[in-house]
Every structure is written in C-alpha cells, then in structure tokens.
Image (cartoon, rainbow, N blue to C red):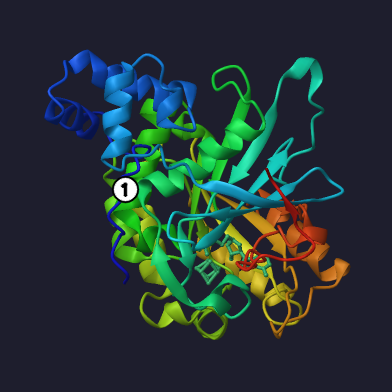
C-alpha cells in the first residue's frame, strides 16, 4: 500500500498537532485555538484569510510552506436531478471524485431547498483508485494509486460545503463514504477524518455511513470505536460461489466470516446494519438468491439497500430487468427484511455508485474558477 504523502497542509491536523505547531513558533496556546476555529469553523481557504492571527505569524507560516491545503474542486458536471460530480485535485496532482446530492442519498425522496435551508448528501472518496477489484465496479479498473490523507478525506467535505455555502448545524448534511476506494483499507486516515468531521466541523456521526466491501479485521476494529459512523456492508451476493465471482475478496474472508465480524458490532436499540446488494442481471437477482439472503440475515438487525447495477464501459454485466428487481425487493420485504431500492443519482454524469472513475480531465466537465 502506498504511504501517505507528508504534507504541510494545515487542514486535517488534529487540535493537538496544531497546538504543537503553534508552540514551535513560540506562540501562546490560544493562537492554536484561533487557527483551529479558522480551519474548521470558518473553513478558510488560505492562511491569509485567518485574520485572527497576527500578520507576522501568517507570513511565517506561509514562508515555511504551510498552506490550508483544501483539495481543489477543479471541475464539475451537473446532472438533471441536481447531483453534482466534482473532479477534485489533490496537492500532488492526483484526482478523486466527490458527489453532492441535494435532497437525500437516493434512498429517500428529494426535498426542495426552501428558505435557503439545505439538505444534501455528500459522497466522499477515501483512496485514489481501489485495490479490491470487484468485477462490476468501474473504480476497480484504475487499480490502487494511493491512500488519501485524513485532511484530503475531510477536505473534500469542507470544499463542497464551501461551494454550497452550507451552514453546519442549521443545514442537514449526510455523509456517505462510498466514493472511490475502500475506506477500511485506509482505516487510520479514514477514522482520523471522521473525528475531524465530527468534533471539529460538527457533523454528527449518526449522519454518516461508511461502506465496506468487507475487510474483516477492520470491521472488528471499527466495532471498538467510541465514535463511529453507521456501517454498510457490500454483500452483493447470497452465497460464496457467486460472491467469489463478483468480489474476489471473498476468497480471503467468506460471507460467514464477514457476518461474524458484523455481529461483533454493538448496536443500540433502534440501530441496524445496512447491507448493500448490487443487482446484476442473471447473476444474483433470481428468487433463489433472495431466499439465500433472507436465510443469511435471519435474526440480524439488518436492512438491505438494493442498487440496480449502473453500467460502465468495459464492465461485463447486465442490468436486472425491472421485474426481477421488483420481485427481489418484494421477497425480502415479505421475508421480514426491510429493503429499499436505491434511486440512482446522477447516472447521466457517471456520478452513480461504482461509476466514479473519471480521474482525467474531460472536455464535458465545466471548470470551477
Ligand atoms: N469500496 C466500498 C465503498 C465504495 S463502493 C464498497 O465497496 O463498499 C459503494 C457501493 O457501490 C458499494 O456497495 C458497491 O458494491 C457499489 N457499486 C460498485 N459498483 C457499482 C455499479 N457499477 N453499480 C451499482 N453499484 C455499484
Ligand atoms: Fe473498491 Fe468498492 Fe469498487 Fe469494490 S465496489 S472495487 S471495494 S470501490
């Protein structure tokens, strides 16, 4: 796995790291708090804008190469449904994608932005590319390029909040860590980012969902976390044979090992684990598969998000028929498992699940100044 790049980006540093930095400049501790408030409360874009700090200190920070270092929303594509997909440029020139979905995450009905009140879901990337190699996913085609730092993960959120003038605390923002990459293969940076987003930016962890392809040891670590987002598991198949074919990682941890790890997560009374299930026509969408899913999840506080497979160039699957998708959904619900079929968002701009791959600048995208 690629190592994290060493960075002089201030955004992403913990309060403790900021304190140490400010002290190394011979400054009083309250300056560290001012810096923290500017970075995470005001979400400033440059050191120059941190007007609470004396000019000399700002100049010294800049002279020593410190920057705020928010990722840059370089280009955007806007869908007819209001979804915006951004090409996000990182300090070393690598790019990832982040998606803004006004109204909800596709599992709910859209809601208009009345009175300037904003309600949206941001889909965040955790790695450049992905090593997991799920056969139906476009991101897999990139291979694994590098992990994102905590600042780059949380910074995607801050950059998008700034673009839309979101007031955290007033507006209702959900985060889904379902963009490019496998968050649980970049566990430490991912969890550092979560803590920054919760404790510094102010987005509650109950409004966050992380999706994993099923990295068993990381799920067990996650179970021990005092502050953790909701968990979604990409199940995507009802038995090991099919799952191995579509998600080769099943050879490492089979479905039973995965479910065992999921059962180790302490859940509150009304909490449940979400299982995502991408419906692949003729592969995993038949009645016998629905029966197997019901048997697997029996007795678990589980809900299932059915995702109709989004096609991508060079990905050799077919979409399920409307009938088989509806039948699958009905069989789960009749069997006692809450199931939701996800309305695909931004499919026309390749912003839907598993379509985030465009890491080169495209002529169809509009530059953001
Ligand atoms: N790597 C993580 C999170 C990113 S993928 C994971 O795999 O869980 C987010 C979701 O999109 C996963 O549930 C994945 O199964 C699904 N997905 C991937 N490719 C897809 C495609 N082409 N169509 C629909 N869903 C897809
Ligand atoms: Fe990686 Fe998730 Fe795509 Fe699988 S579905 S290749 S884990 S991004």
| Residue 63 falls in image quadrant | top left
Q: Is residue 15 above or below residue 364?
A: above
Q: Number of marks in the image?
A: 1
Q: Which quarter of the figure is the N terminus placed in?
A: bottom left
On screen, residue 70 versus residue 121, left or right, reads left
Image location of residue 159, percent across then percent down: 55, 38
On screen, residue 297 versus residue 363, left or right, reads left
Determine the residue positioned at 75% across, 18% down.
Answer: 116
On screen, residue 4 versus residue 140, left or right, reads left
On screen, residue 241 versus residue 118, left or right, reads left
Tell which quarter ligand 1 is in: bottom right
Q: Nearer the viewer, residue 25 or 298?
A: 25
Image location of residue 117, percent across then percent down: 72, 19
Q: Is residue 134 visible?
A: no
Per the image, the residue denoted by label 1 is 223
Q: How crowded is mark 1: few (under 14 residues within 10 Å), some or many (20 or more)?
A: some
Q: Is residue 89 above or below residue 258?
A: above
Image location of residue 164, percent across then percent down: 67, 31
Q: Is residue 229 visible?
A: yes
Determine the residue positioned at 37% across, 74% down.
Answer: 253
Image location of residue 321, percent across then percent down: 85, 72
| Secondary structure type for disc 1 | helix
Q: In this view, does 295 lie above or below 80?
A: below
Q: Which quarter of the figure is the C terminus placed in?
A: top right
Determine the residue positioned at 55% across, 65% down.
Answer: 295
Determine the residue positioned at 87% across, 66% down.
Answer: 322
Q: Nearer the viewer, residue 282 or 327?
A: 282
Badge 1 residue CB within 8 Å of ligand 1: no
């Amino acid at each position: 796995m690629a190592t994290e790049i060493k960075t002089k980006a201030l955004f992403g540093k913990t309060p403790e790291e900021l304190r140490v930095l400010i002290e190394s400049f011979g400054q009083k501790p309250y300056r560290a708090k001012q810096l923290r408030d500017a970075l995470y409360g005001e979400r400033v874009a440059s050191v120059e804008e941190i007007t609470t700090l004396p000019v000399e200190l700002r100049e010294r920070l800049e002279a020593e190469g410190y920057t705020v270092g928010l990722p840059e929303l370089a280009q955007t594509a806007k869908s007819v449904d209001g979804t915006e997909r951004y090409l996000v440029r990182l300090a070393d020139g690598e790019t990832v994608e982040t998606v803004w979905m006004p109204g909800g995450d596709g599992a709910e009905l859209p809601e208009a932005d009345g009175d300037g009140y904003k309600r949206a879901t941001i889909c965040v990337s955790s790695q450049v590319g992905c090593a997991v190699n799920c056969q139906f996913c476009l991101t897999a085609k990139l291979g694994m390029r590098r992990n994102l730092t905590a600042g780059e993960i949380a910074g995607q959120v801050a950059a998008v909040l700034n673009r839309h003038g979101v007031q955290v605390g007033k507006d209702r923002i959900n985060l889904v860590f379902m963009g490019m990459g496998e968050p649980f293969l970049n566990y430490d940076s991912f969890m550092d980012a979560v803590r920054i987003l919760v404790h510094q930016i102010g987005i509650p962890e109950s409004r966050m969902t992380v999706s994993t392809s099923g990295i068993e040891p990381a799920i067990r670590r996650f179970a021990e976390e005092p502050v953790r987002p909701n968990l979604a598991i990409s199940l995507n198949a009802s038995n090991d044979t099919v799952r191995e074919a579509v998600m080769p990682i099943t050879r490492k941890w089979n479905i039973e090992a995965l479910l065992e790890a999921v059962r180790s997560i302490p859940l509150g009374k009304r909490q449940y684990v979400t299982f995502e299930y991408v419906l692949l026509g003729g592969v995993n969408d038949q009645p016998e598969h629905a029966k197997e899913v019901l048997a697997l999840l029996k007795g678990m506080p589980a809900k299932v998000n059915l995702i109709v497979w989004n096609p991508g160039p060079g990905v050799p699957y077919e979409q399920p028929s409307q009938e088989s998708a509806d039948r699958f959904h009905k069989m789960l619900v009749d069997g006692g498992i809450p199931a939701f079929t996800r309305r695909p968002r931004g499919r026309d701009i390749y912003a839907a699940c598993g379509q985030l791959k465009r890491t080169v600048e495209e002529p169809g995208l509009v530059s953001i100044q």
